[in-house]
Image (tube, rainbow, N blue to C red):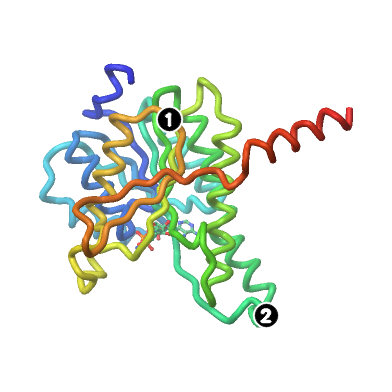
């Protein structure tokens, strides 16, 4: 780890989805560290509410930006603001939306298409905008849910787009170079305690727990990783478990061997 990796004060950070439930806690944590935090949101009202809820923090600077990062124009607007504000130290994607519906045999194809278009493709665009703006020894962190790794009934469209997103992150990692940021995907394995889910027992992971884990990664780690994180009844602290490749070394050897053998 380089010495300056620990320092966050005054540095520019982007929290996409920063006006959302978990994003707000991540934004709060970065402000407490003294960072300048750019939060894009499609909603003026949500940005206003975010500013109000963060009023108690006197450090750092909140840079609210009304724009839709799910569109080409919105990403262009965000990129222009990043250029104006200076070097980017870290970027977080806390973007997401829930979907539940009919079984795989009953869900209309158009509905699956709509969910993929509404959440997978925006993630592709977001990474293409943020990763080039991040230099070496910076961090890109993406939040996801356990449905990206495990199927359960009646959430197929959500699970498929979550799985597509984690696959996209794997490709970003596979193509990373010395001049790209460290990439982390954090797969949260339960519901999260936030302002709207206070009925969830306090033993479960909170937005603040996730924010602290992100701070730890940004200031202490220097590797690409996909990991599950969670906390629940009986756990003393947040559990961080790296997700291992599902493919054996022998499978990989055979794949690359076949590429070579084809000539
Ligand atoms: N909350 C949980 O219990 C839980 C559990 C496991 C995993 N997670 C993961 O954690 C992440 C954040 O969850 P959350 O509960 O904080 O979500 P949230 O409160 O719903 O906020 C997510 C943010 O994503 C943005 N967003 C959603 N769809 C978008 C689109 N099509 N284009 C542009 N922006 C879009 C919204 O931004 P605007 O401000 O523009 O509306 C919103 O503020 C998600 O990836 C989710 O899968 C959450």
Disc on the earlier residue, 2 or 1: 2
Residue positioned 67% across, 73% down in the render: 110
Residue positioned 36% across, 45% down in the render: 15
- Which one is in front, 245 or 165? 245
Badge 1 element:
loop
Residue 92 in the image: x percent, y percent? Answer: 39, 43
Considering only vertical position in the picture, is 113 above or below 133? below
- Which one is in front, 242 or 169? 242
Side (left or right) of 178 relative to 242: right
Residue 244 in the image: x percent, y percent? Answer: 50, 44
Evaluate whether residue 198 shows in this view.
yes
Residue named by callout 1:
223
Side (left or right) of 257 relative to 239: right
Side (left or right) of 135 relative to 233: right
Residue 82 in the image: x percent, y percent? Answer: 41, 33
Residue positioned 24% across, 60% down in the render: 49
Quadrant, the C terminus: top right
Mark 2 Cα-neighbour bin, 10 Å: few <14, some 14–19, many ≥20: few
CA gap between label 2 and label 1 equals: 40 Å
- Which one is in front, 214 or 114? 214
Residue named by callout 2:
105
- Which one is in front, 24 or 99? 99
Considering only vertical position in the picture, is 17 above or below 92? below
Badge 2 element:
loop
Evaluate whether residue 194 shows in this view.
no
């Amino acid at each position: 780890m380089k010495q300056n990796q620990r320092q966050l004060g005054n540095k520019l950070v982007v929290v996409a989805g920063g006006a959302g439930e978990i994003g707000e806690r991540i934004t709060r944590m970065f402000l407490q560290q003294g960072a300048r935090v750019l939060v894009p949101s499609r909603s003026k009202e949500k940005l206003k509410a975010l500013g109000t809820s963060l009023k108690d923090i006197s450090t750092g600077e909140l840079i609210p930006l009304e724009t839709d990062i799910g569109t080409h124009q919105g990403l262009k607007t965000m990129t222009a603001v990043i250029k104006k504000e200076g070097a980017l130290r870290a970027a977080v994607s806390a973007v997401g939306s829930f979907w539940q519906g009919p079984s795989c045999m009953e869900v209309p194809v158009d509905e699956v298409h709509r969910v993929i278009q509404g959440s997978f493709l925006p993630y592709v665009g977001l990474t293409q905008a943020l990763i080039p703006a991040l230099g070496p020894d910076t961090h890109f962190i993406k939040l996801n849910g356990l449905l990206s790794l495990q199927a359960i009934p009646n959430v197929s469209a959500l699970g498929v787009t979550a799985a597509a997103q984690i696959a996209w992150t794997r490709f970003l990692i596979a193509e990373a170079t010395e001049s790209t940021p460290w990439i982390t995907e954090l797969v949260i394995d339960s519901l999260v305690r936030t302002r709207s889910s206070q009925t969830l027992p306090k033993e479960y992971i909170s937005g603040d727990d996730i924010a602290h884990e992100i701070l730890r990664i940004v200031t202490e780690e220097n590797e690409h990783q996909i990991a599950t994180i969670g906390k629940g009844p009986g756990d003393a602290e947040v559990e961080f478990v790296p997700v291992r490749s599902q493919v054996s070394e022998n499978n990989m050897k055979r794949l690359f061997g076949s590429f070579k053998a084809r000539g």
